Amino acid sequence: MRVAFGLLLLSTMLLSACSSVMSRKYEYEEEVFLALDRSATVNVNASVPALVALRGLDLPVDPNARLDLQKVRGFYETPVTRVASVTSSRRDGRRYVHLRIEVANIQRLSEAAPFSWSATAFIPRSDGIIFYAHRWNLPAGEDVGDVGWNGTERVAFRLHIPSRVTFHDSPSGIERGNILVWEQLLTDRLKNVVLAGQVRMESESILNRTLSLFAAMMAAVVVTFAAAIWFVKTRKVG
């Protein structure tokens, strides 16, 4: 009986945790997968009204109107960005678009019109640390009327770090997978309430560090094994 109750309690906790994670919905989200050579993949997940209000896209906010994904692609395809994919979905009575964008140099991202509201610094230092900073400035501020927003909608800027973080100012701390997040209410973003983040990271990737440690461990094992064989042979000779 106690075991069954324990399993029931555990399953309830897991379901609650999953529900909490799944309930984290954003009206606008930029997700940057950063590489140490300054290149990045940027995912944009946003409602159509948010794209109109924040970035000034000329799209119909009526969820029943035809959504031209080629027009969305054309807006995000620039000399410094390449759109790898664009799809759409529906949620809470609104249309959403989902883009995956490749950029060769994250510092040039603001040259693309959809990201012109941001400014990025990527500065390698002589001590093996990279300083990264991002600031999101004034949005386009287009009026979208009543699209069902109730004031609780949020925006998020998510950064995936490829190496060990030595400093950051993300309010939520480092999430699993070396992820940092900066969030604010959509109403604050529309009012241009300051949103900025800073990170200091090592210039060596986590993968390279892991491989180096593994190689060192294997070398130590080989040396230990060879020493053991030598010791056994010398004892036999003696």
Image (cartoon, rainbow, N blue to C red):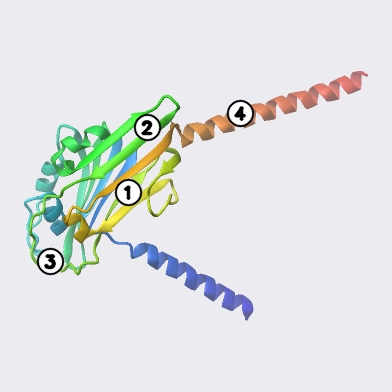
Residue 202 location, x and y as percent? Answer: 44, 33
Q: CA distance from mark 4 to mark 2?
A: 23 Å
Q: Amino acid at mark 3?
A: Val
Q: Earlier in the sequence, mark 3 or mark 2?
A: 2
Q: Earlier in the sequence, mark 4 or mark 2?
A: 2
Residue 97 location, x and y as percent? Answer: 19, 53
Residue 158, label in figure: 1
Q: Disc 2 marks which residue?
A: 36
For discs 4 and 3, the disc positioned in front in the rendered view: 3
Say which quarter of the image contains residue 66: bottom left
Which element type, helix, strand or loop, lies under badge 2? loop
Q: Earlier in the sequence, mark 1 or mark 4?
A: 1
Residue 147, label in figure: 3
Q: Earlier in the sequence, mark 4 or mark 3?
A: 3
Q: Residues within 10 Å of mark 2 (few under 14, many from 20)?
A: some
Residue 222 location, x and y as percent? Answer: 69, 26
Residue that extends furthest to the top in the rendered view of this protein: 237
For discs 4 and 2, the disc positioned in front in the rendered view: 2
Q: Disc 4 marks which residue?
A: 216
Mark 1 touching mark 3, by CB under 8 A?
no
Mark 1 touching mark 4, by CB under 8 A?
no
For discs 1 and 4, the disc positioned in front in the rendered view: 1
